[in-house]
């Protein structure tokens, strides 16, 4: 919101300089985005009238003018502009004037006016263009002033110097979208009294007056008022009104419309003026009809939807409620009778209509954030008084109204000493009471009555925050700025995620960040979402209820955006791999041959209506940098990917073969018996579609809840270990994980480790029978209390062999 300090200081005493004010507002949460200087504050620049103009005797492009600057003696000025005529009034910089750009004035080149000769003809000053005066008007030539300007008057009287603050108002502080609200804020922050007497007006209550008003959509419009002013004279606004509007970024139109905009800025309540003679019958507040079109004041025609609220007469819509009036009933120079609208519209209704139509106005901006219901009648009365003063006419004695204004007044309890307790420093009760009273609250015991214009104050901590903004965060002693609090699940999740990032970066992975909104094709990439699936599916598309959740390559139930910006952002991503594979493709097309990428982020489930954290990995290209020393020259494969996942410390992961049409080699990943993801290699044809010529292995898992117990430490063994090997013939279907499970769950206390060091099959059946395989394990035994004897090791080894033979039906090789 653009805020004129000239206007603001009429309502409250401001700090001595602008920088002090901007710092005060910023520290209080009202961000100052920019500071602009308007107007002219240059000495010896006056209004002059051109009396005579002749051709320069020695220059074709120059003229010699005689001007009256009010000094009593005409001055001779050499001028190069061509956009003037004799009789025009223009700015004249007299000798000694320092125009913008002089070093003594702040910056730029020296530009001091002196008496001198131009091509042999004396010039006693300079007639100025807007640019030379630092004004924004883009005029090619001199600045032509109004004919009623007084000759000899300082130009600063026509263009008073002003400083404009561009304030960024947060959505919860709708009370600051007016000069009254900002003045109240500055008054509370500085402790200086606001000139509130200038803002009060006698309010005439709304009744069922002469104007028939019918509200057919009370949910969208709880309260509507209108008042008729007859016999007005529409014309230009006075200079003071134009200056206030233009300083606030609003263009002057005519005195009636300007008054409604003035009250909008002053009080924050949008108003609208109708030409009463163009309305047909009474006023009806209703929802738009099917296919109804509306011609707005901006000259564009809008097709309305059924949920759009309109103001209508008996025949057609005459305004889009809270957004913009209609061209057919707007106030023009021929308007004699005016109906002034002031109402309260539901913020959500105005916001939806403005967004759907792409029509944002100063009124909708305020209605969307919520205006003060108690200000509806006060603003109407203020506007009526100004109309009678500036446009004449007579107002109806009563304000017609329908409905009831919402009551947003509430009472919030603030316990004694609570501010001191929260802030960690002593703040007296008198100081607290003074601050809250300055913000417009009224005390009643331990309770505070919150006015309707402060809809953001609903809890005790909100009142503490108001006190803090005035007291100042920088006034709280440093030793009290932070206190120890216990870690939360969010803290644990953050720490776990950062640990994963560091681990993956140490293994040569680069982190990618993709958009949460993706296209339909990206959402269908493997794996798009987790679906419930039976333990041993006969088909990858079979979906039944169950506890295990392998990945399924379907897009049913994804969350779609109702009004997407582009076709590439229509679905909330159900997986990470879709976007990550796109990153791989882009890098490959850019010439990168080997890639290790990961992404850690949120995915979205339509069925469960929830978000979950996933980790996705992609590897393609060489498994390691080739060199003369290592001689490694192979592409990354499924086992490289499996090793990376196993090294992350998420728990005891198990990998089982799975059927998946999207992957040539597919495996489901389990943690504690629960399916958490899948891994595998893309079909070569799928990889070629992404312009990738090397194998692509990928995995995506749902991250389990973080472990909050912290690190666990073990004592370094003091006693030596003993190793025994086992070589056995087992069915090909037996998995390594199954063997490990039998060994580790056997309850053997001396077993310290198991390592698979050989797997052998023979398709001919000569060395190993067909359908069988040879598996060789190294078993490590150790005690933390003593050195083991040979007999103890042999006994433990024999027990484990017996357990393997009993549960897995294996035969041991000698």
Image: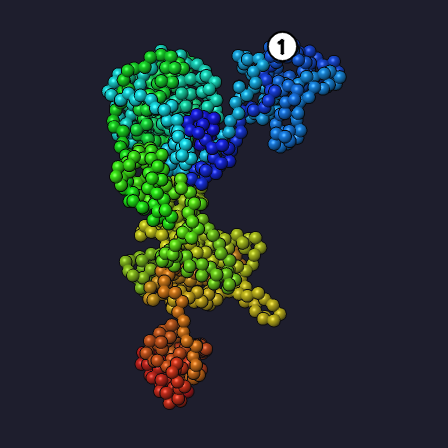
- Could you tell me residue 402's position as x and y percent? 25, 24
x%, y% of residue 360? 41, 31
Please indicate, yes or no, whether residue 715 appears anywhere in the rendered image: yes
Q: How is the image coloured?
A: rainbow
What element does badge 1 sit on? loop
From the top left corner, tell me how far across and down residue 553 is, in percent: 38, 55
What residue lies at 37% left-to-right and 33% top-to-bottom? 175
Horizontal arrangement in the rendering, residue 335 relative to residue 593 (left or right): left
Q: Return the x and y of residue 253 as percentages of the image width and height.
A: 45, 19
Q: Residue at x 26, y 16 (%)?
A: 210
Residue at the location (40% across, 15% down)? 390
* Vertical comparison of 170 with 105: above or below: below
Q: Nearer the viewer, residue 519 or 73?
A: 73
Q: Nearer the viewer, residue 298 or 576?
A: 298
Q: Quadrant of the N terminus?
A: top left
The quadrant of the picture occupied by the C terminus is bottom left
Q: Quadrant of residue 66?
A: top right
Q: Quadrant for residue 81, please give it.
A: top right
Q: Residue at x 35, y 13 (%)?
A: 337
- Crowding around mark 1 (Cα neighbors within 10 Å: few <14, some 14 to 19, many 20+) is few
* Residue 811 visible from this viewpoint: no
Per the image, the residue denoted by label 1 is 72
Count of marks, rendered view: 1
Q: Is residue 296 above or below residue 726?
A: above
* Camera-nearest residue between 745 and 117: 117
User: Does 525 sit left or right of 54 as displayed?
Assistant: left
């Amino acid at each position: 919101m653009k805020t004129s300090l000239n206007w603001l200081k009429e309502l409250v005493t401001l700090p001595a300089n602008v920088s002090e004010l901007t710092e005060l507002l910023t520290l209080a949460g009202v961000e100052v985005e920019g500071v602009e200087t308007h107007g002219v504050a240059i000495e010896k620049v006056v209004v002059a009238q051109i009396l005579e103009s002749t051709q320069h005797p020695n220059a074709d492009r120059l003229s010699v003018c005689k001007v009256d600057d009010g000094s009593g003696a005409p001055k001779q000025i050499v001028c190069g502009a061509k956009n003037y005529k004799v009789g025009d009034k223009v700015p004249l910089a007299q000798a000694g004037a320092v125009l913008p750009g002089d070093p003594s004035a702040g910056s730029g080149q020296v530009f001091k006016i002196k008496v001198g000769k131009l091509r042999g003809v004396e010039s006693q000053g300079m007639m100025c263009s807007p640019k030379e005066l630092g004004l924004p008007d883009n005029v090619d030539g001199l600045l032509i002033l109004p004919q009623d300007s007084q000759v000899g008057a300082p130009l600063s009287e026509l263009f008073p110097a002003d400083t404009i603050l561009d304030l960024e108002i947060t959505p919860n502080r709708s009370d600051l979208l007016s000069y009254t609200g900002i003045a109240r804020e500055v008054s509370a922050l500085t402790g200086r009294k606001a000139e509130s007497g200038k803002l009060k007006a006698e309010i005439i209550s709304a009744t069922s007056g002469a104007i028939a008003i019918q509200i057919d959509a009370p949910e969208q419009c709880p309260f509507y008022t209108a008042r008729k002013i007859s016999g007005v004279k529409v014309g230009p606004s006075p200079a003071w009104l134009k200056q206030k509007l233009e300083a606030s970024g609003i263009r002057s139109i005519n005195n009636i419309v300007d008054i409604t905009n003035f009250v909008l800025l002053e009080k924050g309540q949008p108003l609208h003026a109708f030409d009463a003679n163009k309305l047909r019958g009474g006023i009806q507040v209703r929802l738009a009809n099917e296919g109804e079109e509306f011609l707005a004041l901006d000259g564009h025609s809008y097709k309305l939807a059924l949920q759009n609220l309109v103001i209508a007469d008996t025949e057609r819509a005459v305004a889009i409620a809270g957004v913009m009036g209609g061209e057919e009933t707007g106030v023009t120079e021929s308007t004699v009778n005016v109906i002034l609208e002031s109402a309260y519209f539901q913020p959500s209704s105005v916001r939806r209509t403005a967004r759907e139509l792409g029509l944002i106005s100063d009124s909708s901006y305020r209605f969307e954030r919520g205006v003060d219901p108690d200000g509806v009648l006060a603003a109407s009365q203020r506007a009526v008084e100004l109309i009678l003063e500036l446009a004449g006419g007579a107002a109806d004695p009563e304000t017609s109204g329908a409905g009831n204004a919402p009551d947003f007044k509430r009472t919030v309890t603030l316990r004694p000493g609570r501010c001191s307790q929260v802030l960690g420093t002593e703040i007296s009760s008198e100081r607290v009471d003074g601050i809250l009273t300055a913000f417009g609250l009224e005390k009643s015991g331990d309770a505070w009555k919150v006015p309707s214009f402060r809809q953001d104050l609903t809890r005790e901590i909100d009142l503490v925050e108001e006190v803090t903004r005035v007291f100042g965060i920088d006034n709280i002693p440093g030793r009290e700025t932070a206190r120890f609090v216990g870690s939360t699940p969010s803290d644990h999740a953050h720490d776990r995620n950062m640990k994963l990032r560091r681990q993956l970066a140490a293994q040569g992975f680069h982190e990618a960040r993709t958009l949460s909104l993706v296209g339909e094709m990206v959402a269908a990439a493997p794996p798009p979402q987790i679906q419930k699936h039976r333990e041993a599916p006969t088909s990858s598309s079979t979906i039944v209820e169950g506890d295990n959740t392998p990945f399924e390559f379907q897009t049913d139930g994804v969350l779609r955006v109702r009004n997407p910006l582009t076709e590439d952002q229509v679905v909330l991503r159900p997986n990470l791999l879709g976007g990550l594979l796109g990153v791989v493709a882009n890098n490959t097309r850019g010439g990168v041959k080997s890639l290790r990428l990961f992404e850690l982020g949120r995915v979205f489930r339509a069925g469960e209506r929830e978000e979950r954290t996933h980790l996705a990995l992609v590897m393609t290209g060489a498994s390691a940098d080739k060199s003369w020393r290592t001689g490694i020259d192979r592409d990354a494969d499924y086992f490289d990917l499996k090793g990376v996942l196993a090294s992350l410390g998420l728990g005891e992961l198990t990998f089982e073969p799975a059927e998946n049409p999207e992957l040539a080699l597919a495996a489901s990943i389990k943690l504690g018996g629960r399916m958490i993801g899948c891994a595998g290699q893309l079909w070569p044809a799928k990889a070629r579609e992404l312009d990738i010529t090397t194998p692509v292995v990928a995995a995506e898992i749902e991250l389990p809840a973080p472990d909050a117990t912290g690190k666990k430490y073990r004592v370094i063994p003091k006693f030596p270990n003993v190793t025994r090997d086992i070589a056995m013939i087992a069915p090909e279907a037996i998995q390594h994980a199954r063997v490990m499970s039998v060994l580790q769950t056997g309850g053997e206390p001396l077993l310290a480790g198991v390592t698979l060091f050989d797997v052998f099959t023979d398709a001919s059946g000569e060395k190993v029978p067909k359908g069988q395989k040879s598996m060789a394990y190294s078993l490590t035994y150790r005690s933390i209390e003593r050195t083991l004897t040979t007999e103890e090791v042999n006994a433990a080894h024999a027990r484990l062999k017996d357990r393997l033979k009993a549960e897995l039906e294996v035969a041991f090789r000698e």
